[in-house]
Image (tube, rainbow, N blue to C red):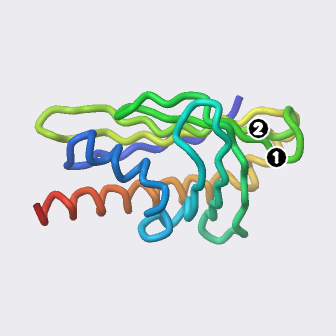
Amino acid sequence: MHKICTDIIIEAPVNEIWELLTDFESFEHWNPFITSIKGKLEPGSRLHVHMQAPGMKGINLSPVLTKVEPVHEYRWMSNLWVKGVFDGEHVFRIEELENNRTRFIQCERFRGILAPFILPLIGAKTRMGFEAMNNKLKKECEKQKRTT
């Protein structure tokens, strides 16, 4: 199994981060990596996701939500072409820290017969996309905190 994981500390409480991270309609305004999500935030729902890592062509995915734990985590499974060729499980996790601080973790685990070949081609730029999203999420949540 191959994975990419990133995390960032955000000076905001978990509920504020969850609110922005689940407001799919706002993604196009703040998110540089996942620019669009349409669908319902409930296990078993199929989402329509557009993501674009820096320096790469955008991709449309139709993942299925496999877990939704309000204020803590949601995750989805997607596959390119057919299941078992190049599959990805994307996880957004929020961990509460002291003093209204939060750790946001974004990971993707890749599986399938082409994972060892495709991941070296897209891994670095995908990590850059995760980090760009994490940094923008931090900026947006901390900006909201300063204006309240």
Q: Which secondary structure lies at badge 1?
A: strand
Which numbered disc covers residue 87? 2
**Residue 135 percent across, percent down from the top left:** 37, 59
**Looking at the image, how many numbered discs can be counted on the residues?**
2
Three-letter amino acid code at the position of disc 2: Asp
Which numbered disc covers residue 148? none
- Classify residue 142 by image quadrant: bottom left
Residue at image position (44%, 71%) is: 29
**Residue 13 percent across, percent down from the top left:** 21, 42
Which numbered disc covers residue 80? 1
Quadrant location of the C terminus in the rendered image? bottom left
Q: Is residue 80 above or below residue 38?
A: above
Quadrant location of the N terminus in the rendered image? top right
Three-letter amino acid code at the position of disc 1: Leu
- Classify residue 82 by image quadrant: top right
Answer with left or right where residue 6 lies relative to residue 4: left
N-terminal of the two: label 1 or label 2?
Answer: 1
Q: Is residue 118 above or below residue 88?
A: below
Residue at image position (41%, 49%) is: 21
- Badge 2 density bin: few <14, some 14–19, many ≥20, Cα 10 Å: many
**Residue 143 percent across, percent down from the top left:** 21, 64
Q: Which secondary structure lies at badge 2?
A: strand
Answer with left or right where residue 143 lies relative to residue 39: left
89 and 61: which is toward the camera? 61
Distance between mark 1 and mark 2 Cα atoms: 6 Å
**Residue 108 percent across, percent down from the top left:** 60, 39
17 and 105: which is toward the camera? 17
Residue at image position (44%, 33%) is: 73
Q: Are marks 1 and 2 in contact (CB under 8 Å)?
A: yes
